[in-house]
Image (spheres, grey):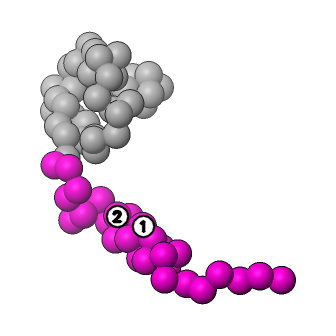
């Protein structure tokens, strides 16, 4: 992450989801030390995280698909 944050300024906003490693003190400090603002997405907010819909579809397929044996 340090390479990504080299040229951050107060006009930059870093938006993170609620992954555990995004909530670490080290992550917060890296972003704040470079002057950028830090915002978190709301938990389970699929409008800003469209991959969540894909994961839900894959999970349903896995749960309801018949077992295949060879």
Report x, y in % for residue 50.
32, 66
- Mark 1: which secondary structure? helix
Residue at point 16% right, 49% down? Answer: 42
- Mark 2: which secondary structure? helix
Q: Residues within 10 Å of mark 2 (few under 14, many from 20)?
A: some
Residue 55 tag number = 1
Report x, y in % for residue 69.
77, 82
Report x, y in % for residue 60.
43, 77
| Viewer-nearest residue: 64 or 29 | 64
Q: Residue 18 in magenta? A: no
Residue at point 24% right, 63% down? Answer: 46
Residue 30 tag number = none
Q: Residue 63 in magenta? A: yes
- The vertical placement of 36 against 25, above or below, is below
| Viewer-nearest residue: 62 or 50 | 62
- The vertical placement of 51 against 67, above or below, is above
Q: Is residue 48 visible?
A: no
Quarter of the figure with residue 65: bottom right
Q: Which residues are magenta?
A: 42-70
- The vertical placement of 40 against 42, above or below, is above
Q: Label 2 vs label 1: CA separation? A: 5 Å
CB of mark 2 within 8 Å of CB of mark 1? yes
Residue at point 60% right, 86% down? Answer: 66
Residue at point 27% right, 41% down? Answer: 18
Name the residue beneath numbered marker 2.
Answer: 52
Q: Is residue 53 visible?
A: yes
Look at the image and tell me in which quarter the C terminus lies: bottom right
Look at the image and tell me in which quarter the N terminus lies: top left
| Viewer-nearest residue: 60 or 16 | 60
Q: Residues within 10 Å of mark 1 (few under 14, many from 20)?
A: few
- The vertical placement of 53 against 34, above or below, is below
């Amino acid at each position: 992450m340090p390479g990504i944050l080299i040229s951050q300024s107060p006009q930059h906003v870093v938006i993170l989801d609620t992954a555990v490693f995004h909530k670490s003190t080290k992550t917060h400090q890296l972003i704040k030390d470079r002057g950028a603002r830090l915002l978190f997405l709301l938990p389970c907010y699929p409008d800003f995280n469209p991959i969540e819909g894909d994961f839900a579809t894959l999970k349903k397929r896995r749960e309801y698909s018949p077992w295949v044996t060879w």
